[in-house]
Amino acid sequence: MGMCPVCNGLNELKVTCNHCHSELIDYGRMMDYGEKYDAYMPIELQKLDNGIKYDQRDEKCIHYVVCPNCQEPSLLQIKEW
């Protein structure tokens, strides 16, 4: 099980929008936007059922990001340590 450097404050997320090149705003882990009791489930168990292929195997933390300029939401895969 890896550790996300962005979630743990070790790295800042510096990614730009593919359309307008503005810096994306990180709204945290995708798993934080699930059902009301999802926060109490182990992260590795949530990764088995989140619809993202191979994020558990490849140790990726999926973050929800939005462009402040064009309001384009997307999911960003961050390599865990």
Image (spheres, rainbow, N blue to C red):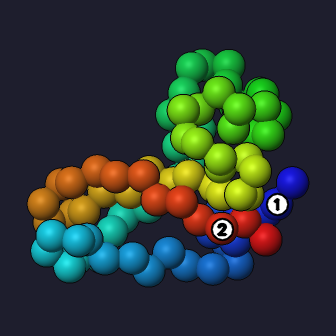
Q: Is residue 16 visible?
A: yes
Based on the displayed image, in which of its 4 quarters is residue 65 positioned? bottom left
x then y, percent, for residue 11: 63, 80
Residue furthest to the top in view is 36
Point out the tag, 2 or 1, that comes first from the N-terminus: 1
Secondary structure of the residue carrying tag 2 is strand
Q: Which percent across, then down, holds residue 64?
A: 44, 51
Q: Residues within 10 Å of mark 1 (few under 14, many from 20)?
A: few
The C terminus - image quarter = bottom right
- Mark 2 is on which residue type? Lys
70, 75: nearer the viewer: 75
State the residue position of label 2: 79
Residue drawn 42% across and 52% down? 75
Tell me the residue that label 1 is attached to.
2
Q: Residue at x 39, y 76 (%)?
A: 15
Would residue 74 appear left or right of 35 to someone viewing this image? Answer: left
- The N terminus lies in quadrant: bottom right
Asked if the residue under mark 1 is in contact with the one under mark 2, i.e. CB atoms within 8 Å, the reply is yes
Of 5 and 77, which appears nearest the observer? 77
Q: CA distance from mark 2 to mark 1?
A: 9 Å
Image coords of residue 80 (percent x, y): 72, 66
Q: Amino acid at mark 1?
A: Gly
For the point 65% across and 27% down, the residue is 49
